[in-house]
């Protein structure tokens, strides 16, 4: 009887463990790992490159971010249908933790947004109240939630996480339309939390982290430019795709074949 009870306990433990990991796929990438739901797919490298080339061709003056990885739903008609998650790997240097712990002044946030609105010719509208920044000291992640209103497109939400590394950061941004966001916010957060830099790149305390941050405003502007450019890239791709479908203009091909 005791043996039977023990076997039953082991069986239940195995089933519980299997259920806990069901539906999650872990992917090993260059310098980090990431886990995504099994109903999501990775966007091929050639697709990311084709869209970026198409964006630059359509508007040579546009600031088109380079995306190292991307993920979207397997059920999506196109690779960049929302909800979508894009990743950028930054190797420009370690960000001091004193900057991340600093309270981001609203005027610095607004300054960064004003620069972006001017660059995008008032297509996108945001203000400081639409951006929330929170640094998780335990997990070394800077969380940024955004809301933006895009002309002829509507309200869109984004959740970003900057996972700090010893050589820069891994920036993951999930974007969804307003009506989709409540359903996918937890998915975005789970994927961001799953990102784990390899040991050699893991963010570690440094003595200079205690120095006062003198460049808070510039740092905020740079961070917002990275995040908003990434979200805006998704919106422009989605907007052009929907316009093409509506017009059914086979002879117009701004972004190449879908």
Image (spheres, grey):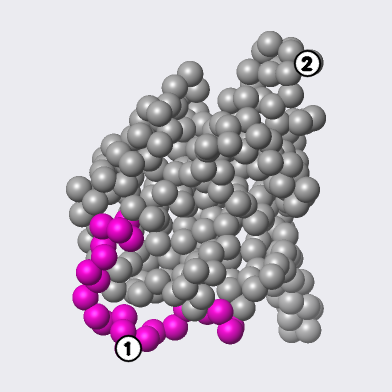
Going by the image, does 131 lie left or right of 57?
Answer: left
Please name the residue shown 69% across and 70% down the image. Answer: 30
What residue occupies the far front of the structure in this picture?
Answer: 60
- Disc ID at residue 207: 1
Residue 46 x/y as whole percent: 78, 48
Residue 92 x/y as whole percent: 50, 69
Disc 1 element: helix
Q: Is residue 236 visible?
A: yes
Q: In front here: 134 or 221?
A: 221
Q: Are marks 2 and 1 in contact (CB under 8 Å)?
A: no
Q: In front here: 154 or 168?
A: 168
- Tell me, yes or no, whether the highlighted magenta stretch contains residue 109: no
Residue 65 x/y as whole percent: 56, 48
Q: Which residues are magenta?
A: 199-220
Q: Is residue 248 above or below residue 3?
A: above
Q: In the rendered picture of this protein, how many numbered marks are placed on residues?
A: 2
Near mark 2 (Cα within 10 A), the count class, few <14, some 14-19 or many ≥20, is few
Q: In front here: 26 or 152?
A: 152
Of callouts 2 and 1, which one flags the residue occurring earlier in the amino acid sequence? 1
What residue occupies the far top of the structure in this picture?
Answer: 247
Please name the residue shown 33% across and 41% down the image. Answer: 115
Disc 2 element: loop
- Residue carrying label 2: 251
Please name the residue shown 44% across and 22% down the image. Answer: 151
Please name the residue shown 43% across and 33% down the image. Answer: 120
């Amino acid at each position: 009887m005791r043996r039977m009870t023990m076997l039953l306990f082991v069986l239940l433990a195995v089933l519980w463990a299997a259920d806990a990991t069901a539906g999650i796929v872990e992917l090993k990438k260059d310098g980090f790992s990431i886990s995504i739901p099994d109903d999501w797919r990775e966007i091929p490298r050639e697709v990311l490159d084709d869209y970026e080339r198409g964006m630059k061709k359509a508007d040579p003056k546009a600031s088109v971010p380079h995306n190292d990885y991307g993920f979207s739903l397997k059920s999506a008609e196109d690779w960049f249908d929302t909800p979508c998650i894009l990743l950028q790997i930054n190797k420009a240097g370690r960000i001091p933790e004193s900057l991340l712990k600093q309270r981001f002044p609203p005027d610095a946030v607004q300054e960064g947004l004003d620069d972006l609105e001017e660059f995008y010719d008032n297509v996108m509208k945001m203000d400081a109240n639409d951006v929330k920044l929170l640094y998780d000291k335990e997990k070394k992640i800077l969380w940024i939630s955004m809301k933006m209103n895009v002309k002829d497109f509507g309200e869109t939400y984004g959740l970003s996480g900057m996972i700090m590394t010893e050589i820069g950061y891994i920036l993951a941004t999930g974007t969804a339309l307003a009506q989709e966001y409540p359903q996918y916010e937890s998915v975005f957060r789970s994927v961001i939390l799953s990102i784990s830099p390899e040991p050699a790149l893991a963010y570690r305390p440094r003595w200079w982290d205690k120095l006062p941050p003198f460049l808070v405003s510039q740092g905020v502007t740079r961070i917002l430019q990275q995040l908003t450019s990434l979200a805006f890239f998704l919106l422009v791709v989605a907007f052009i795709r929907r316009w093409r479908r509506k017009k059914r203009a086979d002879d117009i091909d701004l972004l190449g074949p879908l």
